[in-house]
Amino acid sequence: MAAKSNWAAFPHDAKAYAYADDALKKAWPKLHAGDCEPFPDAKRAAALLKAAGKAAPKLDADALAEALQDAWRAFHHGDFKAAFDAGEKLGPIGASVAVKAIGIHTTYLVDDEAEQLKRYEQAGKLAEAAIKALPDEANCHYRHAFALGRYSQGLSIGKALKMGIAGKVRASLDATLKLEPKHAEAHTALALYHAEIINKIGAMIGGLTYGAKAAEAEKHIKEALKLTPASPIAHVEHGNVLLLLDENKNEDAAAAAYEKAAKCKPLDAMEALDATYAREQLE
């Protein structure tokens, strides 16, 4: 279990990302502009308990709301292990924060490739269980796509395609956007889906086999930037999409995108890691 392994600490000053008490609710719309996660107040918690049925934790709405808020508070502060543990403990209802916590931590703070794959696989299983329990929650589908997408990036393109991961990622992203059309991170991920397939197997085969199109990549990343212009990750992935589509032609434009990301003011630990990554691409 990833929770039992050694989790590297968030490497930056997290003082500004504490969001104690009501500060979390106040900052929530900006903190979750990218993933449209609803604020987990008691009303939201009650709805989740009802929807999850037997898969729900044995808590009342107030206790669940408090537990979810604490888990997200830990996530935003960079206490990724605490956020993961708290989310995992809540079962499918806590999968959104659990998967995001282990996913972001693994992306930026785990170097060992085997450990990365193990964690992304675990995240994918948590998200799968969440989809079964809460099929109408956009982020159950998005977290699934995120985990599978990251997992596939650690495999050879041949193995990833043979396992049918591309189709599963696409299906989960389509489900996300059907439930939440303004999900910026899903738009970003869909842009990467198109761009990565074109980069790996070419526009013709990618288009015929997986429906991958450069124009779709450009459309979705443009939408993500429109929805979250202050988000470092939207600009980071814009740069990545540009390089995947045509590294030689788009090198300067990608650098400009990374510069924008680096200049964004991080609102939480994740965004601080995103902005740091952008700065590293410019070095």
Image (cartoon, grey):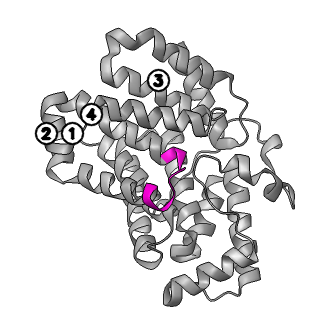
> Can residue 4 be seen?
no
Per the rendered image, the range of residues in magenta is: 177-185
The three-letter amino acid code for the residue at tag 4 is: Lys
- Asked if 205 appears above or below 282 in the picture, the reply is below
Reading the chain from its start, which is encountered first: label 4 or label 3? 4
Is 182 left, or right, of 174 in this rendering?
A: right
Residue 55, labelled with which disc? none
Query: Which of labels 1 and 3 is toward the front?
Result: 3
Give coordinates of residue 46: x percent, y percent: 67, 82
Locate residue 59, reporting x and y percent: 67, 87
What type is the residue that disc 1 sits on?
Answer: Ser
* Quadrant of the image occupied by residue 62: bottom right
Residue named by callout 2? 208
Q: Secondary structure at mark 1?
A: loop
Q: Nearer the viewer, residue 203 or 140?
A: 203
Q: Could you tell me the amino acid type at mark 3? A: Gly
